[in-house]
Amino acid sequence: MDFELKTLTPHQTASTVADALLVLWPDAADQAAPALDDPLTLWARGAVADEDLPAGAGQCLAAHRLPGVKPRRVVLARCGDGSPSQVRKAVQAAWALLKAGQPKTLLVLASAASGAAVAAAVQALADASYVYTATKSQAKPRSLHKATLAVADATAVRSAFARAVAVTRGVELAKEWANRPGNHATPSLLAEAARQLAKQPRVSVDVLGPKDVAKLGMGAFLAVAQGSEEPLRFIVLKYQGAAKSSAPVVLVGKGITFDTGGISIKPAAEMDEMKFDMGGAASVLGTFAALAELQPALNVVGLIPSCENMPDGRAVKPGDVVTSMSGQTIEVLNTDAEGRLILCDALTYAERFKPRALIDIATLTGACVIALGGVRCGLFANHDDLAAALADAGQAALDPAWRMPLDDDYAEGLKSHFADMGNVAGRQAGAVTAAKFLQKFVGQQRWAHLDIAGVAWKSGAAKGATGRPVPLLVQYLLDEVDRQALQPAAGLGAQPIKSAKAAKPPKSDKAAVAAKPTKAGKAAGAGSR
């Protein structure tokens, strides 16, 4: 979908041709001096005076062929105090009324909106109108092709608008891949999506196969992948927006493209949803799509260990001991705690980049879903400033996180009689003990872990991927540009971004590409629950 930003008065908006019009009405407008006499303002003031538009963000009033207004369908939506969260609620409610008419073009009058509120309107509209079509033979695509935001001063909010459009692209890429069935989103196809991203300026990619991973000594990653016919892929994306000497932020996304639980097999009910266990990987792809569009002055590395977790005769068994890339041994007590096994090797690999910050993103534990539900993701960090920066970014992006503890006492349950550690520590505090496991592989690096099992996917009537936490990650990275400008990277171990030693694309990749991913995938590109 295309977005456009224009400086338009209410009079000009009323005379602009479009299939539909959404008027965002803040509470403050109820008491404003009646200086405007355009048909939209007069209609809105009359609706308020007659109490046809009750107070409260999300309250709406629809009109058909309003005199003096060119768009045929008009919806007036209250947006409360005009804050981003209230604007988002208003847009979501308004679209519920507008979508039945399947408008192709939409005007959004947001005269008094701040930059953050405009961004919220863009993202809410994109989210509400998104339609998945990749594997449907007769699906109707998104009806809305273009949305124009009419504001009092486009120049004042243009930067926020541009950010929002880029974030929207990234969110939709993340949704696309997390929504695809496991046979349409294999590790090889994820690698192809990354290669498509690498066609963008400043983005490059290396893809490592099983032999490359074996040479690196990634025994934990290999153990998870060995039960599947689909070959693993270790994807190394790089965005070079700053000097080569500037230390990068490294993002690590869990890429289990389907999770059966392995030998510790999951219940059949809702196992189909385990296609979204690569939500962390999808969010890394989406973040890179946004970076390619925004071109910030920052270096970012994206690491995606990707494989399936399957239960065949070669699969890793409960009680097996594997050796990670770090040299630490792990007793696999539960094969459904596989995400941390692939992540631990990727975290060790990340050390070579000497990152200014290392952040992993994973649909890691059902325990986090129980703790936080679908509102906030779990945030774990070994440095207070990093935790605060991520939490602030989440609040600003309407993609909130909640900091969880990392007390050393939580690691007691990971002790093993037969290895350096077990991969699970019992039912209590499962999200925390999973994070404590990962922490054993980050050393002294500034590290954070985002458990997105509760926020990356919705079940029920709204079933599908959410694209979170792409907004949080993009906001954090853009904020990091500002922090980096104020505090040079001299003391952060800055090093050039090294190139991964990747083999040529193996035959399995070529076969996957031959399957021709859908146009949406090309354009864009929970496990241990």
Image (spheres, rainbow, N blue to C red):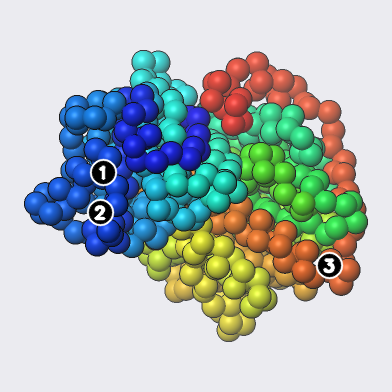
Which comes before the other along the chain, label 3 or label 2? 2
- Asked if residue 417 is positioned above or below residue 513 in the image, the reply reads below
Residue at horizontal 75%, vertical 22%? 507
Position of residue 513 measured from the top left corner of the image (x, y, whole percent): 66, 20
Q: Amino acid type of disc 3?
A: Pro
Corner quadrant of residue 485: bottom right
Of labels 1 and 3, the one closer to you: 1
Position of residue 66 measured from the top left corner of the image (x, y, whole percent): 19, 31
Distance CA(mark 1)–CA(mark 2) = 8 Å
Corner quadrant of residue 354: bottom right
Position of residue 500 measured from the top left corner of the image (x, y, whole percent): 85, 44
Residue at horizontal 77%, vertical 51%? 297
Q: Amino acid type of disc 2?
A: Pro
**Secondary structure type for disc 3:** loop
Position of residue 481 measured from the top left corner of the image (x, y, whole percent): 72, 59
Mark 1 = which residue?
37
Q: Nearer the viewer, residue 513 or 202?
A: 202
Q: Nearer the viewer, residue 368 or 342?
A: 368
Mark 3 = which residue?
488
Of labels 3 and 2, the one closer to you: 2
Distance CA(mark 1)–CA(mark 3) = 53 Å
- Asked if residue 78 is positioned above or below residue 400 in the image, the reply reads above
Q: Is residue 460 left or right of residue 154?
A: left
Q: Is residue 157 visible?
A: yes
Residue at horizontal 39%, vertical 60%? 83
The answer to whether the residue labelled 3 contacts the one labelled 2, judged by CB atoms less than 8 Å apart, is no
The answer to whether the residue labelled 1 contacts the one labelled 2, judged by CB atoms less than 8 Å apart, is yes
Numbered-mark total: 3
Q: Is residue 124 left or right of residue 229?
A: left
Mark 2 = which residue?
34
Q: Nearer the viewer, residue 451 or 247?
A: 247
How dense is the environment of label 1, judged by Cα within 10 Å: few (below 14), some, or many (20 and up)?
A: few
